[in-house]
Amino acid sequence: MKKFNKIELNKIIILGFLLIACIFLTYYFHFILKTEVVFTHLFYIPITLAGLWWSCKGIVTAILLAAVLPISHILSPLETPLLAELVRSLMFVGVGMSVGLLNEKRCILEDKLRKYSISLEQRVNERTSEVKELQEKQRAILDSISDAVVVLDKNLNILWTNKISQDQYKSTPGRKCYETFKDAKEPCLDCIARKTFADGLNKSSEEEAIIKDGRHINFIVSCSPIKDSQGEIISVVEIFHDITERKKDQEKLKKYQENLEELVKKRTIELEEKSKKLKSTNLKLRELDQLKSMFIASMSHELRTPLNSIIGFTGIILQGMPGEINEEQKKQLGLVKNSANHLLDLINDVIDISKIEANRVEPYIHEFDFAGLAREVQSYFAIASDKKKLKLSLEAPHTLTVKSDERRTKQILVNFVSNAIKFTDRGEIEIKVIQKDEIVEVSVRDTGIGIKKKDMDKLFKAFGRITTKGRIEEGTGLGLYLSKKIAHLLGGDITAESEFNKGSVFILTLPLKR
């Protein structure tokens, strides 16, 4: 069973006394005084209290009390109509039910209100905690920055300040900002805080201040307005950024720049003096270089004529025209002829390069069949490729008309194929001619020894011979250098790709019309 607490017991006792009192008064007025004026209203008091205290129990109490009326009618000496007593009984029941139901709703509403009040209080506490935590975070952030931050009212009183401002600038809430930062008794004439209060705009300025230890420092102060929900300026926030060290560095930099400018002026004068001398020397060197090139170019006949004579007479002797010679003499004369031919090739290359560098080469431009030229080069090297058992193939259109220098173009192709045969021991050599718009491209691909990546930059340099371990090849080291010069002279270019031990490809590109 449910145990009643002290308050409930008190309510039951009070209600019991009221019921006994009502019954007694009912007996007194109804049976002794023989009147029913008060009787019909006596039981409303306990019914109302019961309904207010216990809701549904009040309804039950009303029903029980309503049953007393018919009983009192039977026992009463008064001649009251039974119907009237029944109506009064129904009135008791109606009053009790109404009070009970209304009280029930009141209790429900009070319970909801209590729960809502508890929930609201919890939310207020949580929100207060969040706001406090946020304020603490904001405070921690503002205290952690190296700049001083203060909030001022319209009278320039400090409302709030962060830790660095308190530690370094001796600022505390309640003090005037000009007393704190300027050690002055009146505001500055150009106070940016006052200007911000006046027009509501952000402002900044560079100023000086006295800090806590008495030192004078330079700082940049920035001022921004703080507005309420109505847009009225209620305060301003100022941020003080110390630039003392930066100012010192600027002064040092300024002095350094001044010294540097003086040094540059001196060096400029010295360099200008040397640049007259260098220009003069450079002119002399250019003249000497041109004289050198002109000398070598002009010596073509004088150098090649005796060599051609040596080669020609050696060939006559080897043919036995002057008389029979033995095998050893043939061997030695053959070496002489080969050396003379090698020397002639070297002289020809040097002369060609000298002529190009001296701008004394005028290409002979005319139309010719590029595909036919490629077939001619293939035929020229057929015996040499067969001797090394190499496949020499050609892929080219039937005809391809090009306007350029035929002899110089052939010189480049001969160099490409000659090198390919020289550095390929097995496999094949492929010559390929194609047309791309207004450009003709010829490539010579081999399956030879290839070139290492570190040696690729030596390819087109004068006398840039690439040596391979265990392999000695004849050559001047001028072939590719001269070919590159000729290609540029004809408006084209030469490129190369190679992979060591797998082969190389050399590509010549020329315009269809020079």
Image (tube, rainbow, N blue to C red):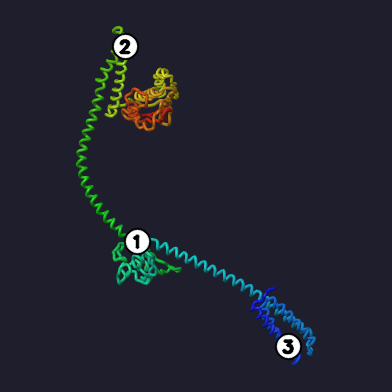
Q: Amino acid at mark 3?
A: Thr
Marks 2/3: CA distance? 172 Å
Q: What element does badge 2 sit on?
A: helix
Q: Which mark is residue 26?
A: 3
Q: Amino acid at mark 1?
A: His
Q: Farthest residue to the bottom: give it.
A: 33
- Residue 64 vertical placement versus 213 (above, below): below
- Of residues 198 and 123, the one nearer the viewer is 123
User: Callout 2: few (<14), some (14-19), or many (20+) C-alpha neighbours within 10 Å?
Assistant: few
Q: Residue 262: horizontal and vertical position, in percent? A: 22, 49
For the C terminus, the quadrant is top left
Q: Earlier in the sequence, mark 2 or mark 3?
A: 3
Residue 502: quarter of image: top left
**Residue 137 appears in the rendering:** yes
Q: Residue 311: horizontal and vertical position, in percent? A: 29, 15
Marks 1/2: CA distance? 99 Å
Q: Amino acid at mark 2?
A: Glu
For the N terminus, the quadrant is bottom right
Q: Which residue is mark 2?
A: 328
Numbered-mark total: 3
Q: Residue 498: horizontal and vertical position, in percent? A: 41, 30
Report the residue at 72% width, 80% height from top: 62
Q: Farthest residue to the top: give it.
A: 323
Q: Which mark is residue 241?
A: 1
Q: What element does badge 3 sit on?
A: helix
Q: Earlier in the sequence, mark 1 or mark 3?
A: 3
User: Callout 3: few (<14), some (14-19), or many (20+) C-alpha neighbours within 10 Å?
Assistant: many
Q: Is residue 227 left or right of residue 17?
A: left
Q: Is residue 89 left or right of residue 152?
A: right
Residue 232: quarter of image: bottom left
